[in-house]
Amino acid sequence: MVPDEFRPDEPIPGDDPSQDPRSDEARTRRVLTGISSRSWEHPADRAALHALRGIPIFDEVLRKLFGFFGEKPIRLAFQANSVQVSHRQFGRVHGLYQEVLRTMDAPESYPLFVSQTPMVNAGAYGMDRPFILLNSGAVSLLDDEELQYVLAHELGHIMSGHVLYRTMLIILVQLAERGFPIVGLAARGVLVALLEWYRKSELSADRAGLLGVQDPRVVYRAMLKMAGGGRPEEMNVSAFLEQADAYRESEDVADSVFKVLNLLGATHPFYVLRVSELREWIDSGGYDRILAGEYTRRDDPEPSYAEDLGEAASAYQREAREFVDDLASAARKMRDSLLENLRSGGGRSGGNW
């Protein structure tokens, strides 16, 4: 535990003073040349993501549904109420983003947009052409380093190949809420499975966000602000970390929380659990090994699904297998429902099916 008098802008007692985020040396970040997303992916996310990619029928369903609307209209719909970031628009954000891209050695510079939304959040969307949408609330509330954490987090989603599934989840949720006929009970089964994976993908992206800023304090401050929405002088990082410690008392508590969140239909808001999971990764030495250069490169061979399960913590192995079975079954039902809908005239004529 850290003392209660610790404030957000102070180093955590017991840490190496050279790692004080206020020091110039600490601000020099290691460029993670050629890093593969496998280096930071959480075992729960990695096993489930590999399962998603291993079910051809699932990708078939999502790409057909994507084709029903068309990628360009979906992309423009997400971007319609936003401003593209460049050296001429949101220059400060543009500079911060460029630094994150360099640190993470991103394969390309993905488009970044700012949308006028008070909620402190961001998202990565798209299919073949990913982009990041940053809410103006985040730009206003977060300082430069905290904003870079959010940008690195979203970049992590893109580099992990999350965006297709995340984009379709958002669309399916919206369609389900509006009672759209193409989203029946079969699609709701896919929704439940996707929601479960969606939350776990946040754990991976949190690790990517930490690697982008390379200072745990920045991440803790950012999550505290996003959880509570308050000003720094009103909040205490130490108390927030103590709150997160409650989730570390049992090895399987995280899985239990996920199951409750599933019933609540939640996607993001579980920052205390996320802080706990991130601290667990740091304590395991995984974060330090990456900064020391011990990480998987993008040109390394892809592991098999069996290897992914073998590397996953035992608490996630059975769950990942059940996830595969449930999702495959739901995807088959959804595909049959979509085809039946088309045959009965419920689909749009001339669509890209």
Image (cartoon, grey):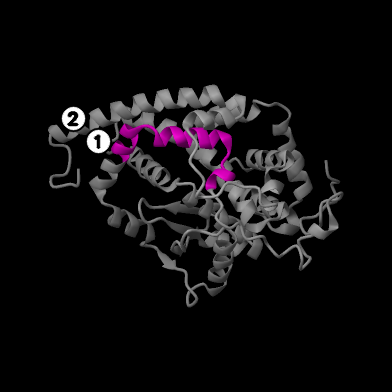
Q: Amino acid at mark 2?
A: Glu
Residue 56 x %, y %: 33, 34
Residue wearing tag 1: 181
Residues packed near mark 2 inside 10 Å, few (<14), some (14 to 19) or many (20 plus): some
Q: Amino acid at mark 1?
A: Pro
Which disc, if any, is residue 340? Answer: 2
- Position of residue 233 relative to residue 206, above or below, is below
- Position of residue 301 relative to residue 94, above or below, is above
Please provide the residue range marked out in magenta: 37-62
Q: Magenta stretch containing residue 10, yes or no?
A: no
Q: Main secondary structure of the magenta part?
A: helix
Identify the residue shown where x is 35% and y is 24%: 329
Q: Nearer the viewer, mark 2 or mark 1?
A: 2
In what element is the residue under mark 2? helix
| Quadrant, the C terminus | top left
Residue 192 x %, y %: 43, 31
